[in-house]
Amino acid sequence: MDSENTSIHEFDVNLICEYFSSVERQGPGSPETTIKALGFIDNLTDKSLIADLGCGTGGQTMILAQHTPAQIQGIDLFPSFIDKLNVNAGRLNLHDRLKGVVGSMENLPFEDKELDVIWSEGAIYNIGFERGLNEWRKFLKTGGYIAVTEASWFTGSRPNEIETFWTDAYPEIDAIPNKTAQMQKAGYIPVATFILPENCWTDNFYIPQIPAQEAFLKKYPGNETAESLIANMRREAEMYSRYKQYYGYVFYIGRKI
Ligand code: SAH
């Protein structure tokens, strides 16, 4: 890659990060569902270590810190998200137990069997569900938990338009029983699965983006990256409102055996 391309690419990434930093969550979810998923996980103490992979600006990481006594490390590829997480942790007086670190879920900075819990909301798709479950397992203690949200089909068949949309975006999307079977095959007891309610997508993800999109387009008039990012996000939201009975995010909680 020549240097001109590198800087264009970095400019794009910075713009995309700026947009997603302007909203509280970078993926669908809610405090209530994080707390519900935590309800399946027992025996956490102040010595326990939770890693939140692809934590973004830390919407769910704060909830983990507020609802467990554990030590928590959030990991994300993008420094601007991690900066925001660390500022929020300081503000909420959680910085003793909660730290954001820049890093990749493909190359985790942990020892084998160091972690009590691996958390990842709306982010495992970056490495792929099966690959993530398999590669991250060695970092968990025996009896430790994994809790991830993953795009899943709710029905056996669906209209072509939404099938094509998802096959382009994330071909690993699959039916819930297939995902659960993958979890079992990777060496976890599937402890629980539940579908995230609609408000995780609407009230907590797409609706807060509406004013953020207007502000962003105003700030970068005529900018191609900004315009295509917003067009994509608007199309994704429209797909969701048309086809939400066919797919959504599912929490998969497993225990390492
Ligand atoms: N968990 C947050 C963010 C979800 S968006 C929430 O639910 O709000 C997905 C996140 O994964 C983004 O913050 C993105 O920066 C991060 N990400 C993408 N690839 C990654 C990688 N290889 N390693 C770590 N984080 C990654």
Image (cartoon, rainbow, N blue to C red):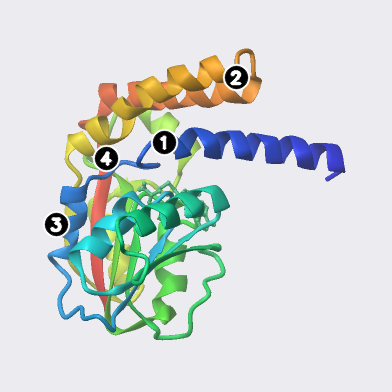
Q: Nearer the viewer, mark 2 or mark 4?
A: 2
Q: Quadrant of the C terminus?
A: bottom left
- Whichever of labels 2 and 4 marks the residue nearer the N terminus, that label is 2
Q: Nearer the viewer, mark 4 or mark 3?
A: 3
Identify which residue is drawn at 69% across, 36% down.
11
Structural distance between the alpha carbons of marks 2 and 4: 31 Å
Answer yes or no: do the residues labelled 1 and 3 have beta carbons within 8 Å?
no
Structural distance between the alpha carbons of marks 1 and 4: 11 Å
* Vertical relation: 130 (above or below) 242: below
> What amino acid is at disc 4?
Gly
Under circle 3, the secondary element is helix
Identify which residue is drawn at 25% across, 80% down.
46
Badge count: 4
Disc on res. 36: 3
On the image, numbered disc 2 is attached to which residue? Answer: 220
Q: Quadrant of the N terminus?
A: top right
Specify whether tag 4 is near ligand 1 (CB below 8 Å): no
Answer yes or no: do the residues labelled 2 and 4 have beta carbons within 8 Å?
no
Under circle 2, the secondary element is loop
Disc on res. 166: 1
Under circle 1, the secondary element is helix
* Vertical relation: 220 (above or below) 116: above
> What amino acid is at disc 3?
Lys
- Whichever of labels 2 and 3 marks the residue nearer the N terminus, that label is 3
On the image, numbered disc 4 is attached to which residue? Answer: 248
